[in-house]
Image: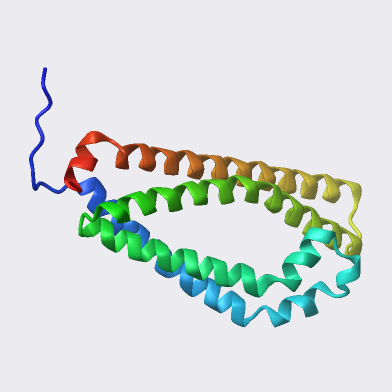
Amino acid sequence: MPQTYNVGSRSRFVTFIAWVFMLLAAFACEWAVIQNATQSSWTALAGDQASLPWLTGLLLRHATWVFLAAIALSLATMVCAFGLLRRIEWARRVFIGLLMVAIVVNLSGLWLQQEFMHLLVDSALRQATLTPSAADVFGGVVTTARVLAGFITLVASLALVGIIRRLMSPSVRQEFA
């Protein structure tokens, strides 16, 4: 059976995705600006950077570049989402590329999440004296948080893969022709 496309019709999916990502990108951009402005207080909270794991110390020293990259990606996402609303082909392709970058960052950030959790738990345990039963409960909460962080990261990555597949479908590509 031949497929029939309605030329000129706009799918709700593309419109919805465009608006959601414009709002998320605006929020992420604002968050990165605020975090960049408050990063000087992080080093005071972290104390001696020489005692920190190498990656955490590196991130604290280069946090400005990380946040500037986050701002740039957020602005690029907003521009592409606006292009999706206007059904511009280059915006669809760049948006798909940005989603692929987001998947890679998400999955590589999974390891970083675990490192920061380890760093926070170790510093908290060094400062607190816990009874064995309280330490067991605390350990269970930490394990649950780690598993949930991994699960949410994987689900978010799968959702982004679904969005990419839908944006690459023939019916959606027809809208951008």
Residue 121, compared with residue 44, is above or below; it is above
Counting from the top left corner in percent of width and height, residue 154 is at 55, 40
**Which residue lies at the image location 71% right of the left edge and 82% below the top edge?**
40
How did the renderer colour the structure? rainbow
Left or right of 64? Residue 138 is right
Counting from the top left corner in percent of width and height, residue 103 is at 52, 46
Q: How many marks?
A: 0
**Which residue lies at the image location 39% right of the left edge and 38% below the top edge?**
162
Residue 11, compared with residue 52, is above or below; it is above
**Which residue lies at the image location 88% right of the left edge and 63% below the top edge?**
128
Left or right of 46? Residue 5 is left
Counting from the top left corner in percent of width and height, residue 150 is at 62, 43
Between residue 162 and residue 128, name the one nearer to us. 162
Q: Residue furthest top?
A: 1
Between residue 25 and residue 142, name the one nearer to us. 25
Residue 30, compared with residue 56, is above or below; it is below
State which quadrant residue 54 falls in: bottom right
